[in-house]
Image (tube, grey):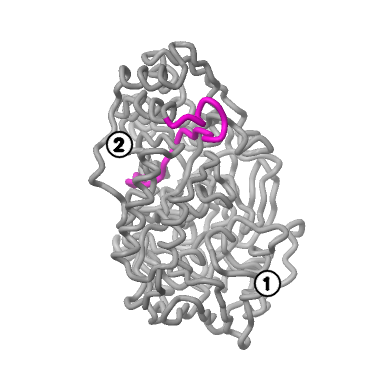
């Protein structure tokens, strides 16, 4: 397809979601990318940056903020380019910052960058840093740091997760122009590069960054101490580009047991918790002195079928498994009704999402027929791997699916894996498993989880026609054409893909009423408004 001019200014058109970013990334939906630079958005000009804007109260400074987060393990990392688990993400958002990012309502905004400008066919992008930015040790942030970070991510010998969001860009394509300017020269057009740079996996690190040393980054908080699998303690970074956080100290405390996290909040051991289990929502909200943060999300907790292994190498089995699910029952029983029904396609806020497809519903007789055609006549048994490390609701959803599968003559044994092990060495090897993802636009999600070279191709999905459509869409600047290509690609996944996506989960968090400045984030699905804790203060 011929290259197209890119004509309008970048605008994110979405809502919310979560994991690896729900865990695997940042919330992104669709965008139209323009030749004009992104307008700088910082300080009070950035939506949600002023905690007093909606309440009229003056934020106070001081105090120690204690937040209970999902438990990690001894493998927790503070490297922002390697953060994978939800625990790692919490640390990442406190410590690091990117060139670009997203406002709470998912508009693309400049962070460290003053502007990010493409040429007319999106084969060359210019990144210019804001003036007078510094690292947490006082050293200036320069173009050398941008070059180092991007080349680190793109290293062909050991590409990091962020590389999948920057198609067309190679190590040799990243060059310094002057102290504040970097040129990105692509091997092919990429109209989505700004969204890729805004992904949390592309946050900046200084030249010579050593993941084994105490990190010196440029996020809102500086690290004081860190005990992997237990807690991290931070102090405010007073020269943060958006302004110094309000609290004197922040402690993120890890809880492997969701109930223990809730009890810590109710008992006053923490001031806020991420990921309030839906089943304990009433217990928290029934007590006095607590508030709930509920955000409609495009986050999804899929069932993942490996299409390269039996029984899922037969598309009829995949279709049958999708017909097994009673989506409304799963939403009510596993998620306490907190969420909304899905149709086995991710990125529901993408402007190219094929919303006109017939909603898939449970049909056990058709499922039995398809399984019989594939050679399985009431004799299919397999293991479903799930974990509390995916989501507080994942294991319950697995159990609901196992019960529903009996109606189609399928025996599903749920293997509950320890949270510290699920995303270990065996991750991506499971034949049938679950996972969790934040909301993204369709193309960026595909590049992270569905293309043949994606780091997290958990379904081992490979489909030449689909891949050709995705590749063409990434290179297409015309939004209407790109959206049509997305619709075609998503329809192929709807018919033949390896994901079962019963629904999308609302993000639930809870916090003490004594806190102010807590931001609502109705898009990403990442807890506590993507851990935007620099705006939080004690009333």
Give 351 or 248, whichever is nearer the viewer: 351
Give 271 or 192, whichever is nearer the viewer: 192
- The label shown at residue 119 is none
Q: Residue at x 38, y 18 (%)?
A: 404
Residue 479 position within the rendered picture, expressed as x and y whole percent measured from the top left: 32, 67
Residue to which mark 1 is pinned? 148
Whether 120 is drawn above or below 251: the answer is: below
First reached walking from the N terminus: tag 1 or tag 2: 1
Residue 262 located left or right of residue 176? left
Highlighted range, magenta: 293-315
Residue to which mark 2 is pinned? 341
- Circle 2 residues within 10 Å: few <14, some 14–19, many ≥20: some
Q: Residue at x 37, y 31 (%)?
A: 335
Picture quarter with the N terminus: bottom left
Pick out the residue farthest to the bottom. 178
Picture quarter with the C terminus: bottom left
Residue 187 position within the rendered picture, expressed as x and y whole percent measured from the top left: 56, 72
């Amino acid at each position: 397809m011929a290259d197209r001019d890119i004509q309008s200014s970048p605008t994110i058109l979405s809502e919310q979601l979560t994991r690896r970013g729900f865990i695997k990334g940042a919330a992104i939906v669709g965008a139209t990318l323009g030749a004009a630079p992104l307008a700088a958005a910082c300080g009070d000009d950035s939506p949600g940056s002023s905690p007093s804007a909606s309440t009229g109260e003056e934020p106070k400074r001081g105090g120690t903020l204690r937040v209970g987060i999902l438990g990690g393990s001894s493998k927790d990392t503070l490297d922002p380019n390697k953060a994978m688990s939800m625990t790692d993400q919490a640390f990442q958002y406190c410590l690091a910052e990117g060139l670009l990012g997203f406002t709470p309502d998912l508009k693309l905004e400049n962070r460290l960058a003053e502007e990010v400008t493409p040429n007319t066919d999106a084969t060359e992008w210019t990144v210019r840093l804001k003036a007078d930015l510094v690292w947490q040790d006082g050293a200036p942030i320069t173009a050398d740091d941008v070059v180092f970070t991007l080349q680190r991510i793109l290293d062909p010998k050991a590409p990091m997760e962020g590389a999948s969001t920057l198609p067309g860009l190679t190590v040799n394509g990243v060059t310094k122009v002057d102290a504040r300017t970097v040129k990105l020269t692509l091997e092919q057009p990429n109209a989505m590069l700004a969204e890729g740079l805004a992904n949390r996996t592309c946050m900046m690190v200084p030249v010579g960054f050593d993941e084994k040393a105490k990190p010196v980054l440029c996020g809102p908080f500086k690290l004081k101490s860190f005990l992997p699998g237990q807690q991290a303690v931070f102090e405010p970074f007073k020269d943060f580009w958006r302004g110094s956080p309000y609290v004197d100290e922040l402690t993120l405390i890890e809880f492997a047991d969701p109930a223990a996290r809730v009890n810590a909040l109710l008992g006053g051991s923490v001031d806020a918790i991420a990921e309030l289990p839906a089943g304990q929502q009433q217990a928290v909200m029934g007590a006095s002195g607590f508030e709930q943060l509920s955000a409609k999300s495009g986050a999804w907790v899929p069932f993942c079928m490996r299409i390269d292994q039996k029984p899922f190498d037969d598309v009829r089995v995949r279709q049958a498994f999708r017909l097994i699910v009673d989506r409304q029952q799963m939403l009510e029983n596993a998620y306490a009704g907190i969420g909304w029904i899905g149709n086995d396609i991710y990125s529901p806020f993408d402007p190219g999402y094929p919303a006109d497809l017939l909603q898939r519903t449970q049909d056990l007789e058709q499922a039995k027929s398809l399984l019989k055609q594939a050679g399985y006549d009431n004799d299919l048994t397999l293991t479903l791997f799930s974990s509390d490390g995916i989501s507080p609701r994942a294991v319950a959803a697995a159990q609901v699916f196992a019960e529903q599968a009996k109606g189609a003559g399928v025996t599903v044994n749920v293997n509950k894996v320890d949270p510290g092990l699920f995303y270990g060495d065996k991750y991506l090897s499971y034949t049938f498993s679950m996972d969790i993802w934040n909301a993204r636009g369709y193309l960026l999600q595909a590049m992270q989880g569905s293309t043949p070279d994606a780091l997290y191709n958990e379904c081992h999905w490979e489909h030449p026609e689909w891949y050709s459509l995705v590749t063409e869409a990434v290179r297409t600047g015309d939004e209407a054409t790109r959206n049509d290509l997305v619709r075609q690609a998503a329809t192929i996944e709807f018919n033949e893909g390896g994901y079962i996506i019963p629904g999308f989960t609302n993000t639930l968090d809870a916090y003490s009423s004594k806190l102010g400045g807590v931001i609502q984030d109705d898009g990403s699905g990442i807890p506590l408004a993507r851990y935007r804790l620099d705006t939080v203060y004690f009333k």
